[in-house]
Image (cartoon, rainbow, N blue to C red):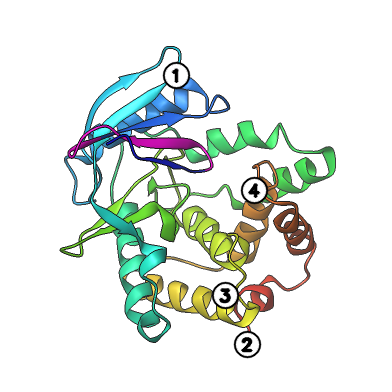
Amino acid sequence: MNKEKTGATATVMTISDERVRKYFQASIEIQRIIQEFRMLEELERTVVPTPNVYAVELEDSPFIEMQRIDGSEMLELFEPERITDFLNTFATLHQRIHQQQSRVAPEWYDVTQQKVHHLQPALRLKAERLLETLHIPQQQGLLHGDFHFQNILVTADETFVVIDWHDATTGPPIADVARTLLLLRIAGEITVPDEVRRHVCREYLDRYQAVSSIQLSNLSDWLRLMAILRTLEQIPSAEQRQLKELISHPDLGAYFFNT
């Protein structure tokens, strides 16, 4: 058996027909591994489909042992003629996550403040100003933290299983929506025309709004903040250049949504 699949933060190794082990890279803090294990334990009791977890090992080569999901990444199943249905399912699942309450996930604001300390001085000042503007009383829910097509596995019976929970927090859903919009707009190694990415962003946001009561008055500020925070991640130089352009762009509405 022993099939492997390597991603940005971990390598998943199949150890039997029923189980896999997710081995984390050395750069991933132990606390985040513990958090993902506890999150998955908690989510087993919710309506959000996730892999069952069985064990966590924190010594030497840390891993989580969990249920093997026999399915394909949502991105692999993308068909342009079904884009509306595709994004409707995607947005509805995202909103379902935001309806959950967690006793395990840390506070989004606390986690973000820690990240801000690692930014370059000029970006840190921008992020601090944005955080001050956006830190207002609003609805709180469970945030996935990295919700995109490659973190959803689709099984043969079309169950959509959400994976990779080590960035989960509790906070305002608009933060998670803005993070997803950022990923849809610029992330990924596949070259996609700007007009297609903007269309996907529009459709996703329309579908999310249709099933939620989210308020979007500060969306541009949230998008700019998410772009600043993503500069801390290990991403290709081409995307770093796009982030630099995005952070200083005068009209993020046009950058993300206009035809």
On the image, the x and y values in percent for residue 194 come to: 64, 77
Image coordinates for residue 118, horizontal then vertical, percent: 72, 32
Q: Nearer the viewer, mark 1 or mark 4?
A: 1
Q: For numbered disc 1, what is the local secondary structure?
A: loop
Count of labels shown?
4
Residue 246 image offset from top left, x and y in percent: 73, 63
Q: Residues within 10 Å of mark 1 (few under 14, many from 20)?
A: few
- The residue pinned by badge 2 equals 259
Corner quadrant of residue 233: top right
Say if residue 104 shows up in the picture: no
Residue identified by numbered label 3: 197
Calculate the distance from the C-alpha at mark 2 to the C-alpha at mark 4.
Answer: 25 Å
Answer whether labels 1 and 2 touch (C-beta < 8 Å): no
- Foreground mark, 3 or 4? 3
**Closer to the N terminus: mark 1 or mark 4?**
1
Q: Which residue corresponds to mark 4?
A: 230
Q: In this orientation, which residue lies closer to the viewer: 159 or 61?
A: 61
Specify which label sits upstream in the sequence, 3 or 4. Answer: 3
- Circle 4: residue type: Arg
